[in-house]
Image (spheres, rainbow, N blue to C red):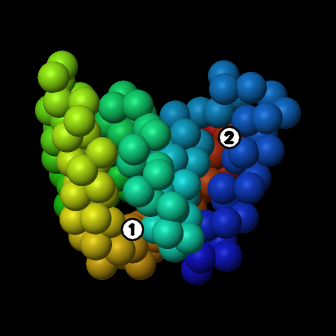
């Protein structure tokens, strides 16, 4: 299944680059964010994704996980975002790197265990959206 997620990610990134952020629907943003998460877990760049993402982006990722019906993963991301927000408090700069590493390690393990289930739910979500697309006679 990882190859399919890669294809989804590549297609959406191309659309984003060619046509800009406004060209992606909410569904496509969910697909892009979650495929990026899954790829980061697979290629061991999850810690960088977590450290470099704005909190708003992490919360949007959690919303996407809710949309694909993966609430446990969404709760894990929201919990990490809350912990990262606390690590960003003024006066905690020296502790931030250790806090981010600790949060990343714990969350990475948790999400790695859920990865195949999240991937399946992502693909199911994508196919459900296609069925409801404008080209479907049932949607007309």
Q: Is residue 4 above or below residue 76?
A: below
Crowding at label 2, few (<14), some or many (≥20) Cα neighbours within 10 Å?
few
Number of labels in the image equals 2
Helix, strand or loop at mark 1: helix
Marks 2/1: CA–CA distance: 26 Å
Foreground disc of the pair 2, 1:
1
Q: Would residue 69 be visible to someone looking at this image?
A: yes
Q: Residue at x 59, y 43 (%)?
A: 28
Q: Position of residue 17 (x, y in %)?
A: 79, 35
Q: Quadrant of the C terminus?
A: top right
Q: Position of residue 106 (x, y in %)?
A: 22, 65
Q: Does residue 6 lie above or below 25 as drawn?
A: below
The image's mark for residue 118 is: 1
| Above or below: residue 40 compared with residue 59 | below
Asked if 27 appears above or below 24 in the picture, the reply is below
Work out whether residue 123 can be spotted: no
Give me the residue at 66% from left, 22% from top. Answer: 22
Question: Would residue 75 be found to the left or right of residue 61 on screen?
Answer: left
> In screen coordinates, is 52 left or right of 1?
left
* Depth check, front residue: 129 or 88: 88
Q: For the point 39% across and 44% down, which residue is it?
A: 51
Left or right: where 138 falls relative to 90: right
Q: Are marks 2 and 1 in contact (CB under 8 Å)?
A: no
Q: Is residue 114 left or right of residue 132?
A: left
Residue 134 numbered mark, or none: 2
> Is disc 2 placed on a helix, strand or loop?
loop
């Amino acid at each position: 299944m990882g190859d399919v997620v890669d294809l989804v990610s590549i297609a959406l990134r191309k659309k984003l680059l060619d046509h800009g952020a406004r060209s992606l629907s909410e569904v496509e943003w969910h697909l892009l964010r979650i495929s990026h998460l899954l790829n980061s877990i697979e290629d061991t760049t999850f810690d960088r994704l977590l450290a470099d993402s704005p909190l708003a982006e992490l919360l949007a990722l959690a919303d996407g996980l809710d949309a694909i019906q993966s609430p446990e993963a969404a709760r894990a991301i929201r919990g990490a975002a809350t912990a990262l927000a606390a690590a960003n408090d003024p006066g905690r700069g020296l502790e931030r790197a250790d806090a981010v590493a600790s949060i990343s390690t714990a969350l990475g393990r948790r999400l790695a265990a859920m990865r195949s289930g999240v991937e399946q739910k992502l693909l199911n979500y994508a196919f459900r959206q296609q069925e409801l697309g404008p080209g479907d006679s049932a949607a007309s």
